Image: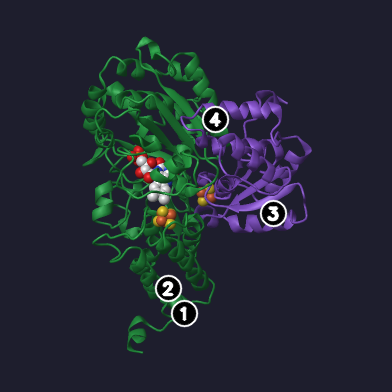
Amino acid sequence: MAETRIVTKRLRDHPDDSWTIDRYLQTGGYEALRKALTMTPEQIGEEQVKASGLRGRGGAGFGTGQKWSFLPKDVYPRYLAVNADEGEPSTFKDHMLVERDPHQLIEGVVISAFAIECHQAFIYLRGEFALGAERMERALAEAAERGFIGKNILGSGFDLDVVLHRGAGAYIAGDETGLLSSLEGERAMPRIKPPFPAVQGLFAKPTVVNNVETLSTIPYIIERGGEWYASLGVGKSTGTRVFSVSGHVERPGNYEVELGTSFRELIEGLAGGVPGGRQLKFFIPGGASSPWLVPEHLDAPTDMDYVQNELKSMLGSGAIMVFDQTTNPVQVAWRIAKFFAHESCGKCTPCREGSTWMEKVLYRMANGMGRPDDLDLLLDFGDNIVPGLNAPFAQTTICALGPSTMSPVVSLDRYFRDEVLQMIGAPAASAVEST
Amino acid sequence: MAFSDDNRRKAQALIARYPVAKSAILPLLHLAQEQDGWVSPAAMEEIAELLELAPAQVLGVCSFYTMFKREPVGRFVVSVCTNVSCLVNRGPELLEALDARYLDDDEVFVEEVECLAACDLAPVLQVNYEFHGPVTPESAETIIEEYRRGTRVARSVSGTLITSSDRER
Ligand SMILES: Cc1cc2nc3c(=O)[nH]c(=O)nc-3n(C[C@H](O)[C@H](O)[C@H](O)COP(=O)(O)O)c2cc1C
Ligand code: SF4
Ligand code: FES
């Protein structure tokens, strides 16, 4: 099984200099921008991007063309914020795309800004990506020198200023409204929606927030057409995605495949499977926020809707974490809970308190101090964060971090309840009920 | 005055990049940390003055973000990831070993961090925001000591861009 490389093609073909302007131009770079500037914004957004079926690669999977069309008519200025804050545990695709193909992102940004009639874009780059910042800063300077950004781009009359903004270590700045707060000089605390950023975003102006991979795809949609892009993938999950595969696999790395490719092809095929002849125990299909899956799901397609509707999980950020038979699932759940407890911004009580308590209870469970009803206690916490848990979805928090804290707990309950109870020395479930 | 004259000019240029001055707060905090190796109260006061904010607002923002150090940390910040992909690849052992090794070392500050978005290199660490992985406790120590001896060129503790001449040294 081979990859279908679109956004990762250049960096794979030219590992030594894929980030330089010379290589970018030599491999057809900025041609899509030239083409886009001869089109109208409607032709780009409505006709091509909408037709491509492209859905956001940041986590929520919202239609990109649709998001752009939510901008209120005739309200200016408008802003474009690039979400390059990549912090979802086990996701490492944007890191690669920024470091190794910064011009591809810049070209996507300029085309998108032109399509949404915006003259000021910000690239919110995760603070820890020092080399990425260095390469992006240089790429922006090169692009400005050659007239791809700045005033009167390629003689079209279109102006765009792009500012690189480094974050400083806060996962929650990756949430789109947290990102906007951070960019405004505040703590990166999310804001309640509505109003959505498209209506009232940065400095209360209409703002589009898009992920690095999403925007890096735009030049190809312009170059080859939305219909071509829509012919790749499966159902409403069109095109390709860059999956970050890590954990217990032979060849951890980023693999770009058509959506719909099975988890098995990614984990066992491209990533080489679990090393040492050991067995797969479980995997997390879409970053730490997504509920876990088990070997019986290996043949499921990486189709966003299928994973959500049939498997009650999500493709999220496209990060697949693999765990072999030696893994203690409670320890993994604890480490993820610790992450959320650390990264909760503290604005909503259920998330702040719930994540902290979840970490404490999972810690004792993972360290031989668990109590018989701890798993049910955890589910009870969850009921205060996401009443009814799965459906109907009623969250009590401002952003999705709160509900995400429940994914490891729900997963333990779904697939490892017996093992967990046995581990903490609890009597069988029925015995607990009868006492 | 906390900023050097040169950095004050840089600060003004950074502020000018944004439609609203306050947006420059993270860039200015990075600049202060690059200059001094940490963010001092004096620097926060000057940033407040430059942005027409109360010093408490600057402290409030500064303390929210883990990269900003509000006390001196030495020349090297070693960030060790223990999140899940590193967890199952001996990240915690790496952290424990480096913690013990550099406990009394004023130049090397070891910290535990969340996923660094380089899980294909697990277990991963950064030295002043330069990635290294996969590493063992032994190879990590070798790398850190090479930075100390100057046989590897380190970034600032803010990970800030080094000049290309530094790079070529
Ligand atoms: C807690 C939290 C963290 C997030 N982190 C990221 C992130 O690091 N990168 C990202 O692109 N999107 C992240 N998102 C999703 C963004 O809110 C937003 O949906 C996305 O950037 C939109 O871009 P897209 O439509 O191109 O996917 C996060 C969301 C939440 C709730
Ligand atoms: S859900 Fe959690 S992270 Fe999100 S705004 Fe509320 S407290 Fe902050
Ligand atoms: S889990 Fe360690 S870098 Fe991602």
Compared with A283, A10 (above or below) is above
Observer-nearest of A396 and B164: A396
Q: Image point 58% across, 56% down: which residue?
A: B90
**Local SS, label 1:** loop
Question: The chain drawn purple is chain what?
Answer: B
Q: Residues within 10 Å of mark 3 (few under 14, many from 20)?
A: many
Which element carries disc 2, helix, strand or loop?
helix
| Relative to A211, B88 lies left or right | right
In the rendered image of this protein, does residue A417 appear above or below residue B87?
Answer: below
Q: Name the residue under label 3.
A: B98
- Mark 1: few, some, or many residues within 10 Å (few <14, many ≥20)? some
Measure the alpha-carbon separation of dots 3 and 4. Answer: 39 Å
Q: Is A106 in front, or is B89?
A: A106
Query: Horizontally, is A150 left or right of A390 in the view?
Result: right
Q: How far apart are marks 2 and 3 (CA)?
A: 32 Å
Q: What residue does disc 4 label?
A: B15
Label 4 CB less than 8 angstroms from ligand 1? no
Residue on which the image places disc 2: A420
Q: Where is residue A99 in the image (x, y as percent from the top left)?
A: 51, 32
Letter of the chain that mark 2 sits on in the rendering: A
Q: Mark 4 lies on which chain?
A: B
Judged from the image, the secondary structure of the residue bearing numbered disc 4 is: helix
- The amino acid pointed to by label 3 is Leu
Three-letter code for the amino acid on which mark 4 is drawn: Ile
Residue underneath mark 1 = A371
Q: Within 10 Å of the Cα at label 4, are there few (<14), some (14-19), or many (20+) other Cα atoms?
A: many
Mark 3 or 4 closer to N-term? 4
